[in-house]
Image (cartoon, helix red, strand yellow):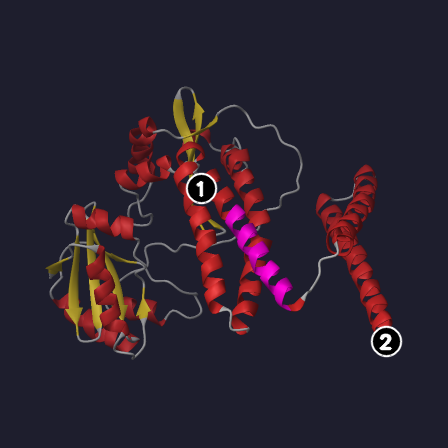
């Protein structure tokens, strides 16, 4: 057993297994901040075997086992040797994968492990259009003074064997980034929501409501809090520019303009850094999202202008901006009219939404098809 002293050591051990080029299986996806905290408290160790490395993290009276190996057979051989020297104490391991394909799970079961609980990862695509809702004035951004109360809720109501209970420093970092929402009632925190934002993906880390306050839709109020919806709105604007920038950049790279693409991308990064320095301290994650959006728009425009310089693409405002906006506005107007009619008739809301979306899609598709035929006809002439 050897003690880990830095996040760099974890990366080096992982690279050592990868460099064998015999395969790679793992349940360890280290976060640099958390690993540094484990190193600070002296709770992370490693065991090195020919094609496998085990990481052992000591926490709350039990040991959490992580592995990196080249294959199931190598993992099995190393696990047998590892367990021979660890016959006492609770050992917990997370096994990732689908129920239909978990040979690693069977491997651990064959060596004395028992299933304690199973977790399911789910995703949701948020809708930006919905019914208007009134949010009670009980949801707040958490402050540093709330750390102790939130940690007490963790210690009381969370199962350390299942949930990875955050350390105080992690919670303080989330709060400093405005990633913690709390619901207050009777002078106490009775619910909280913690999330991370990576790129354009929002990860819901913890979502908790006090048992005595459940069945009051507090969890729904937290999840639908306007702050979160504002972030989703910004991300909705960011996505098309993100993909368009990637596409235009790829075209420029294919034309041999790699230096220009690199310079413009670096300029966009500098804009993002400027927003991080100037805006994030005052507005939190909102400033980061706005900076990312502005940088993507600027890089996208720069890419397009250079392509236009090379090929004289042209940019008719009516054809590429006003006309699509007009078609979209008309389609939304008609679909909303149908939507209101169906709601008046008492039709199910899910059907109404599907019908509304279908109306928009069919109208826009028809217009595009017509435009394509007209363009083809003019080309032949």
Q: Position of residue 103 (x, y in %)?
A: 35, 72
Q: Residues within 10 Å of mark 1 (few under 14, many from 20)?
A: many
The answer to which of marks 1 and 2 sits earlier in the sequence is 1
Residue 137 is a magenta residue: no
- Assign the magenta stretch its main secondary structure: helix
Q: Is residue 333 visible?
A: yes
Where residue 58 is drawn, which disc sits there? Answer: none
Q: Residue at x 62, y 31 (%)?
A: 133
Most distant residue in the right direction:
381
Q: Residue at x 47, y 52 (%)?
A: 268
Q: Nearer the viewer, residue 175 or 221?
A: 175
Q: Secondary structure at mark 1?
A: helix
Most distant residue in the bottom direction:
22
Image vertical order of residue 329 relative to residue 311, above or below: above
Q: Secondary structure at mark 2?
A: helix
Q: Position of residue 120 (x, y in %)?
A: 44, 55
Q: Nearer the viewer, residue 94 or 283?
A: 283
Give left or right: position of 208 versus 156: right
Give left or right: position of 107 versus 134: left
Q: Position of residue 178 (x, y in %)?
A: 41, 36
Which residue is the site of mark 1? 275
Query: In which quadrant will I find the N terminus?
Result: bottom left
Q: Which residues are magenta?
A: 293-310
Which residue is the site of mark 2? 380
Q: How many marks?
A: 2
- To which quarter of the image does residue 314 belong? bottom right
């Amino acid at each position: 057993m050897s003690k880990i002293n830095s996040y760099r050591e974890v990366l080096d051990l992982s690279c050592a297994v990868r460099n064998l080029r015999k395969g790679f299986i793992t349940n360890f996806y280290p976060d640099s901040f958390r690993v540094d905290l484990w190193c600070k408290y002296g709770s992370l160790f490693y065991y090195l075997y020919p094609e496998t490395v085990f990481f052992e993290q000591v926490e709350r009276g039990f040991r959490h086992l992580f592995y990196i190996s080249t294959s199931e057979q190598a993992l099995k051989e190393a696990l047998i040797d590892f367990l021979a020297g660890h016959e006492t104490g609770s050992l917990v391991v997370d096994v990732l994968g689908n129920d239909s394909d978990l040979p690693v799970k069977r491997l651990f079961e064959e060596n004395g492990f028992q299933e304690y609980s199973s977790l399911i990862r789910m995703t949701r695509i948020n809708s930006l259009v919905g019914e208007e809702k009134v949010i009670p004035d009980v949801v707040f951004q958490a402050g540093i003074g709330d750390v102790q109360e939130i940690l007490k809720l963790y210690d009381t109501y969370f199962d350390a064997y299942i949930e990875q209970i955050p350390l105080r420093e992690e919670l303080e970092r989330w709060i400093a980034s405005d990633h913690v929402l709390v619901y207050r009632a009777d002078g106490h925190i009775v619910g909280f929501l913690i999330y991370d934002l990576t790129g354009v993906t929002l990860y819901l880390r913890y979502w908790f409501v006090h048992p005595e306050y459940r069945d009051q839709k507090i969890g729904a109020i937290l999840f639908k809090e306007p702050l979160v919806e504002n972030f989703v709105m910004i991300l909705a604007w960011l996505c098309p520019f993100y993909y368009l920038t990637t596409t235009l950049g790829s075209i420029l790279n294919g034309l041999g303009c790699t230096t220009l693409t690199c310079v413009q991308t670096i300029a966009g990064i500098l804009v993002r850094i400027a927003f991080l320095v100037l805006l994030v301290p005052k507005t939190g994650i909102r400033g980061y999202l706005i900076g990312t959006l502005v940088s993507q728009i600027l890089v996208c425009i720069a890419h397009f202008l250079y392509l236009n310089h090379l090929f004289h693409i042209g940019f008719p405002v009516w054809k590429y901006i006003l006309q699509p906006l007009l078609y979209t506005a008309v389609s939304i107007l008609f679909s909303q009219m149908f939507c209101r009619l169906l709601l008046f008739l008492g039709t199910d809301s899910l059907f109404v939404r599907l019908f509304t979306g279908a109306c928009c899609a069919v109208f826009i598709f028809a217009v595009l098809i017509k435009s394509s035929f007209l363009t083809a006809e003019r080309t032949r002439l």
